[in-house]
């Protein structure tokens, strides 16, 4: 038994995959570095100088006990919030960030622990039900297995 939850390790490996290599968006012919945020401020309000940015967070975890008695299949739901910089075309920035994230995650494969990793949906972010213009959420599912009595790494 380890002291690290497998879901935690997968979240960290997922984020590390996104950090590999250069990550920029084109804003009117100028390459602007995308910042990876460690925390997301309340109300999604981020200072312009910290944009463009993205934030990775877990949104849930599902368990399926029906696969076998020796393994519990779990599905970790991760979201990647993409936030554009004011000026230029925010949709272009979001498209560039989404493509970069998708390619980096595909290149990472299954992070050495997962059975699968797939993009489920992409949507406009919402705060209190209202759309947050210039923000997009990518929803991923990472499926992995653990023994019934040990969810650790």
Image (spheres, helix red, strand yellow):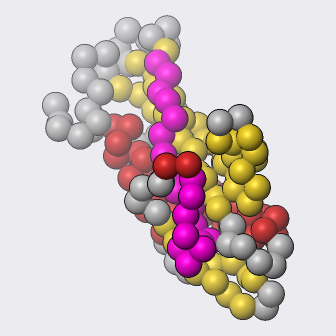
The quarter of the image holding the N terminus is top left
Quarter of the image where one finds residue 71: top left
Residue at 57% over, 53% down = 44
Q: Find residue 24 and report its horizontal and vertical position in percent.
A: 63, 79
Height in image: 71 above or below 10? above
Q: Percent position (x, y) of residue 55? A: 52, 56
Point out the image quarter for the C terminus.
top left
Viewer-proximal residue among 75 and 137 = 137
Residue 53 lies, in percent from the top left, at 57, 67
Q: Which of 44 and 82 is in front in this view?
A: 44
State the residue lying farthest toward the bottom.
Answer: 29
Image position of 103 (left or right of 147): right
Query: Residue 39 sits in which quadrant?
Result: bottom left
Q: Where is residue 60 in the image (x, y as percent from the top left)?
A: 49, 30
In this rendered view, identify the residue nearer to me: 130 or 99.
130
> Does the stretch in magenta take in 47?
yes
Q: Is residue 24 visible?
A: yes
Does residue 120 appear in this view?
no
Q: Is residue 7 left or right of residue 126?
A: left
Instruction: Classify 49 as above or below 153.
Output: below
Q: How many labels does the image show?
A: 0
Compared across the picture, whether 71 is left or right of 138 comes to: left
For the point 57% across and 58% down, which residue is it? 45
Q: In the image, which residues are magenta?
A: 44-63
The relative height of residue 19 versus residue 129 in the rendered view (above or below) is below
> What is the quadrant of residue 103 in the picture?
bottom right
């Amino acid at each position: 038994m380890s002291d690290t939850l497998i879901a935690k390790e997968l979240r960290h490996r997922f984020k590390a995959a996104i950090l590999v290599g250069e990550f920029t968006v084109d804003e009117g012919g100028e390459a602007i570095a995308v910042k990876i945020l460690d925390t997301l401020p309340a109300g999604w309000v981020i200072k312009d100088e910290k944009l463009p940015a993205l934030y990775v967070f877990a949104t849930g975890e599902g368990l399926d006990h029906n696969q076998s008695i020796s393994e519990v299949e779990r599905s970790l739901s991760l979201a990647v919030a993409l936030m554009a910089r004011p000026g230029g075309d925010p949709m272009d920035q979001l498209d560039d960030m989404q493509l970069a994230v998708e390619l980096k995650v595909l290149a990472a494969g299954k992070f050495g622990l997962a059975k699968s990793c797939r993009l489920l949906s992409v949507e406009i972010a919402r705060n209190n039900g209202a759309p947050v213009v210039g923000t997009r959420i990518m929803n991923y599912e990472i499926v992995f297995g653990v023994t019934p009595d040990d969810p650790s790494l």
